[in-house]
Image: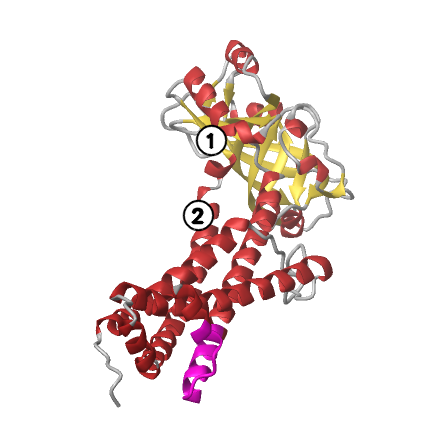
Amino acid sequence: MYLKFAWRYFKAKKSTNAINIISWVTAGVIAFSTLCQVLVLSVFNGFEDLVKSLYSNFYSDVKVVPDKGKTFTLTQSQLNEIHKIPGIKGTSLDVEEKALLQNGDQQTVVLLKGVDSNYYKVSGVPEKMYHGVFNVGTIDNPKLVLGAGIENAVGIQADRNLLPVTVFLPKKTDSDNPSPLSALSEGNATTSGSFAIQQDFDNKYVLTNLPFMKQQMNYGPDEYSALEISLLNADKTKDFTKTLQNLLGDKYKVLTKYEQNTSLYNSMRLEKWFIFAVLTLILIIAAFNMVGALTMLVLEKRKDISVLQSMGADKSLIQKIFLSEGILLAVVGAATGIILALIIAFLQIKFHLIKLVGNSFLIDYFPVKLVITDFILVAFTAMIIAFAASWFPAKKASQQMFNLKA
């Protein structure tokens, strides 16, 4: 019954025009806020998916690294035990270290990564070539695959450079106090191509073959920096990492793709929810309008409330009527905002109407991904704020004693 009264009050024309204006302004602000919240969350979802896809081209599903230090020992028998775990698509061993890359007078510090012949099974880098081909060479004929940004830093185009570049790497020595020259290796390698994935990788990484890296750094036969693993079903990553961690023990860390990029994913989520919190403030501002509109409505409907009391209506019914009135305002506003957000999102997905400023990103439009939980969250937030804003006027209405005397 109280919903019928609330609906009649909502659609009926008030004697004081200001009540109508405040009510529709309140619904409009709620609609605008929910529209912005849905669109912002959807755009952040789109960017998050895009960044994850870019990073997934470089990082494997699972990565084994040493618990302490830069390297670990992984024997062939251990590798055989790992390969017995079901769900593995491919594995690749690598060694990674900072190096100085020099081409004539130009030089730059890079992260040099030595990979084995199975690297294509765990990484998408071979499919993201910008110049030339993916060829890391052999121990006797080492080749380098550069990030696209490294090409500019050393002044070459990787697929056209015929002269070797010099690679300086730190190496292990037997002496406790090695001289600077004995702790540094120098090798020459030619370039075969370059890759372009994302600036973090393109400006930092250079790939070569694993035997060359181990030779230059004087590593042992079973000494590596990491073991990278790709899975047949990425959804089972969590169970796989637990099994692998139990198999290898505490001297190794088994990291998921998320754990390899914790700072990135955490910062993206923090930005997303910070913007959501800021936009929620607009809803809170709308709540003050709602308090004013409902308070004025209570004053206008004093005689109606007195009639209801004379007919036996208790305080609870009167309170529910005005609570429902506030929630109706929120429902109309939130529904309008969500519908408009859906229309704009679908238009953006289909026609890419809103463009990104500048040409520095891989795409020239705002990516959008709709997630049902975002809609539920936005609607729930609007309802909670509307309920809180309606509570005080509704409570005051139920507590006041009215009579029918003029």
Left or right: residue 211 versus residue 265 is right
- Say what secondary structure mark 2 lies in: helix
Within the magenta stretch, is there residue 181? no
Q: Earlier in the sequence, mark 1 or mark 2?
A: 1
Type of the residue with mark 1: Leu
- Nearest to the observer: residue 279 or residue 372: 372
- Nearest to the observer: residue 134 or residue 271: 271
Q: Quadrant of the N terminus?
A: bottom left
Within the magenta stretch, is there residue 12? yes
Q: Residues within 10 Å of mark 1 (few under 14, many from 20)?
A: many
- Nearest to the observer: residue 269 or residue 56: 269
Please tell me which residue is depicted at 42% across the width and 64% down the height of the picture: 3
Quarter of the image holding residue 311? bottom left
Label placed on residue 377: none
Residue furthest top as drawn: 77
Q: Residues within 10 Å of mark 2 (few under 14, many from 20)?
A: few
Query: Which percent across, then down, holds residue 55?
Result: 58, 42
Query: Which percent across, then down, holds residue 381?
Result: 41, 59
Labels 1 & 2 near each other (Cβ < 8 A): no
Q: Quadrant of the C terminus?
A: bottom left
Q: Which residue is mark 1?
A: 255
Query: Which percent across, then down, holds residue 7?
Result: 46, 70
Please tell me which residue is depicted at 24% across the width and 87% down the height of the picture: 405
Q: CA distance from mark 1 to mark 2?
A: 16 Å
Looking at the picture, does residue 289 appear above or below residue 246?
Answer: below
Type of the residue with mark 2: Asn
| The magenta segment | 8-27
Query: Which percent across, then down, holds residue 118?
Result: 65, 24
Label placed on residue 266: 2
